Image: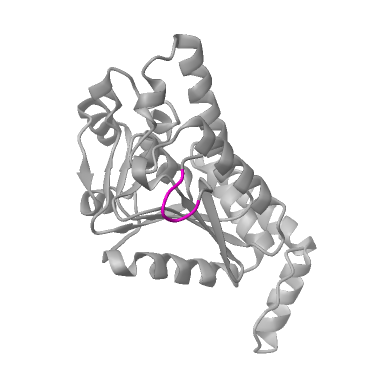
Amino acid sequence: MEPNAIADDLVLRRDVGPVALLTLNRPKALNALNQPLLARLAERLREIASDADVRVVVLTGAGEKAFVAGADIAEMADYDPATAQFFALAGQTVLNHIGSLGKPVIAAVNGFALGGGCEVVLACDFAIASQKAKFGLPEVTLGVIPGFGGTQRLARLIGRHNALRWILTGDVHSADEALRLGLVTQVVAPEELLNTALEIAQRIATRGPVALTAARQVVDQGWDVPLADGLRKEAAAFGRLFHSADQKEGMAAFLQKRQAKFIGK
């Protein structure tokens, strides 16, 4: 681990009520993803997956310049093909864990989100961006391609043509362009970013945890299948929720005109 002004931990964790704030913490390297950082992020995600007190995660980067400026080129430069493939698979595994966490994950993009950083954003449920944020997949400028899921997730999110323009040019795009294409859902002033993300996370955290998990699963399972298949998945999940204590509590609270107290069961 490299020392820095904040702490030695490569992924800081701070709990704000039921929200876990994770900060990728290599500011001197613009939070570039290397193997130790990916390993620490995987550890943090496992902690949170088993922590019933955490209902939502906000993921951001340390410092004022970068969310994640990319994968660590100094580490990768001398990889042989087998090592490079292993690194790509390891990165994909960690980012897949974000999607399978069972809890919503919001990216708070405070600066550069390039290469692997853009791929981290794509793996999250949605993203809020600072006006200073920049996005792109510039791997072709290095003679390689995105390896942490960028070619697959970006095309599914913004369409094949838009994704290929990003990937084949390697251009860097503004937060407003990312908003226009749907990569982020909101752009705010830099000083408002973290509070905005935490406020949204806190609001989500008051909703039924079992329903949140089911909603994420149905969206993920249904977005690339025929509509009729997706609708069947939705109806089945809707029915299963009527076995849950959260459904009983949520509807009882509505009828009794009080705030629901969900237990996640």
Q: Residue shown at 21%/39% (left/top)?
A: 172
Magenta segment, prevailing SS (helix, strand or loop): loop
Left or right: residue 212 versus residue 166 is right
Q: Give the position of the C terminus as an image quadrant.
A: bottom right
| Stretch of the chain drawn in magenta | 3-7
Left or right: residue 11 versus residue 126 is right
Q: Is residue 6 magenta?
A: yes
Q: Please, is residue 210 above or below residue 258 in the view?
A: above
Q: Position of residue 159 (x, y in %)?
A: 32, 37
Left or right: residue 205 versus residue 88 is right
- Counting every numbered tag in the picture gives 0
Q: Residue shown at 49%/42% (left/top)?
A: 223
The front one of 233 and 7 is 7
Q: Position of residue 82 (x, y in %)?
A: 50, 11
The front one of 15 and 118 is 15
Q: Position of residue 93 (x, y in %)?
A: 57, 32
Q: Is residue 173 magenta?
A: no
Decide if residue 24 is in sight here: yes
Q: Report the colour scheme.
A: one colour
Q: Residue shown at 73%/69% (left/top)?
A: 246
Decide if residue 225 is in sight here: no
Q: Position of residue 117 (x, y in %)?
A: 38, 40
Q: Residue shown at 37%/37% (left/top)?
A: 154
